[in-house]
Image (cartoon, helix red, strand yellow):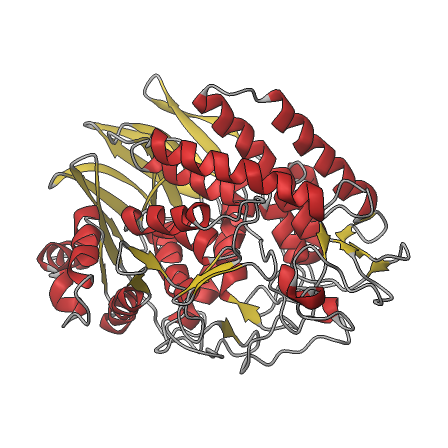
Amino acid sequence: MSMGLQLLDRLRQTDTGAKVGALKKESDAAVLGEWKGSGVKFASSSEDFEEVYYTALRKLLDCIVPAGGEAPILHEGGVYLGCWLESTGTINAEILSRFIPSVSEASFGLFADYQREDGLMPYKITGSGPSYRQIQMVTPLARSVWNHYLLNGRNREFLSKMYGAMQRFDGWLAAWRNTRGTGGVEAFCTFDTGHDLSPRFWHVPDTPHLGDPRECWPDSPVLPFVAPDLTANAACQRHYLARIAQELGDTTQAWKARAEESERSLLRHCYHEEDGFFYDLDRSGQHVRVQSDVLLRVLACEIGDRAFFDEALRRYLLNTRKFFAKYPFTSVAMDDPRFDPFSSYNTWAGAVNFLSLIRAPHAFEHHGRHVELTWVLQPILSAMSRMRRFGQCLSPWTGEEGYTESYSPAILCLLDYVERLCGILPMPGGELWFTGLVPYAMDHGREVAEATAYSRIVDGVTYELVNTREEAVLYRDGEEHLRFPAGTRAVTDRSGNLQSLVGMSVRTVQGSVIYRGSEIGVTVKGNEQLQLAGGRLVTLLDIGVVVPAYA
């Protein structure tokens, strides 16, 4: 029996409950039952890597806790006992939505439930209740809510509730965080962006003046900052609020106009033309020229076209002097003298943070930069194959896990990266991505997995994907459905009908696609998209590959 068939057999025999082991609290049974209902299972030729995967699931259950005796919500995990708007209530819940959507919906909903009368949402919710001390936002809540809505049955009641809350919060930001009249969103403190210990915020207090998010320290020589990540967040948020408004039958024009206003403010006040970078603008009109993961945050908010993104890749994200460390991405550029690589404490001064890693894919995929993203997935999965604690950050030099443990962004990063590299990824637009890659041995030749198998149930249909170094084989309800070359991604609709093929390697991949009894010869370059038309795969898009840089 071939390795692929052996893995498929193992996948089918996997008992997820047995893999997870004894449950620790009453709510775990229903949560694990929902995971099982997704049909997601994973098998690897490396039992060690498979064990890491199910250890992550086991620790994920520890991060899902009933809120006030009611529905379970996602907690940040580790030392962070609660749900944070910048992470747990947005990007974390957006990823979790593919696996345990009821917990994501409950987590989103709490931020609306605890909204203040003046429109401010809490920045976190803990066992002690909501806290409103700062704003602390990064991933646009509206995008996360919209994607959850599209993936999970289009619950209009939920969407309407969240729309009203986000509309009111937008009004609060406009009223209280635009004191300089720039049209941007201002940071009053370090914690407004969650950039703890970052040199971006040296000589800035961690919290707002007197603990009031409407107040900025009046004696600061630099505050308030017009913040690029906060302003980009508002722009992206408003674009998605326009989509939600259209879905609910509300007017969209005002949201689109506000989004464009935010983008203009971002480019006018925070973009440094010579550097090609986004910086805070301090009260005296100086740019705070610290090159940090602010760039990645802005790009993940869909700012700029593909050419703009490609230039950012060349100069910064794929530059080994800047952010493209052995384990990318650093939180501060490596050639900045203030760069600090240590990861043994809660820091955004240089270490690789898992929140950056789970926010990054959207920026790349939004511009069709799928191959370049794999250069991030591969080393991080290699590092994660050694993880036991699931800490908050990694050393950019060694990949060793750092501060805290059972941190839900790290756990979700593993689940997300496996699904993007060698699994079955349902997309909000209705497509299914079946990616024909396997984790590569990046560290000392230590094998991560020579072959993998992954399953997921979509609309009652069980899909199983088996990956080897030679090919990918997709099964639909137990029957072989599609074969395609390793190094490519097959894109189907939710019924499994093949739509296109994407080149997922820097090399040109040649081989055959076997689909519905026909064999289709294929040659596909990196990032090239081939569309199935008239029984042939023809080029739809060919944008080439942006290669790493060193200076």
From the viewer's perspective, is 405 left or right of 87? left
- The N terminus sits in image quarter: bottom left
Task: Find the residue positioned furthest to the top.
Answer: 534
Q: Is residue 544 visible?
A: no
274 relative to 189 in the view: left or right: right
Q: Which residue is drawn at 17% across and 47% down?
A: 37
In the displayed structure, 245 sits above or below 335; it is above
Residue at 82% x, 46% y is 269
Quarter assignment of residue 317: bottom right
In front: 505, or 47? Answer: 47
Q: Position of residue 408 (x, y in %)?
A: 39, 65
Name the residue at the front extreme: 117
Q: Which residue lies furthest to the right in this view?
A: 284
The residue lying at 47 percent from left, 72 percent from top is 392
Q: Can residue 37 be seen in this view?
A: yes
Q: Residue at horizontal 31%, vertical 60%?
A: 68
Closest to the observer, 80 or 453 = 80
Q: Residue 527: where, in percent of width, then height?
A: 51, 40
**Residue 248 coordinates in the image, percent (x, y):** 44, 23
Above-or-below relation of 126 to 527 = below
Q: In which quarter of the image is residue 160?
A: top left
Q: Tell me: residue 198, above or below residue 242.
A: below
x then y, percent, for residue 146: 44, 36
Quadrant of the image occupied by residue 549? bottom right
Quarter of the figure with the C terminus: bottom right
- Between 509 and 487, the residue placed more toward the observer is 487
Q: In this view, does 109 lie above or below 350?
A: above
| 30 or 452, nearer to the observer | 30
Count of labels in the image? 0
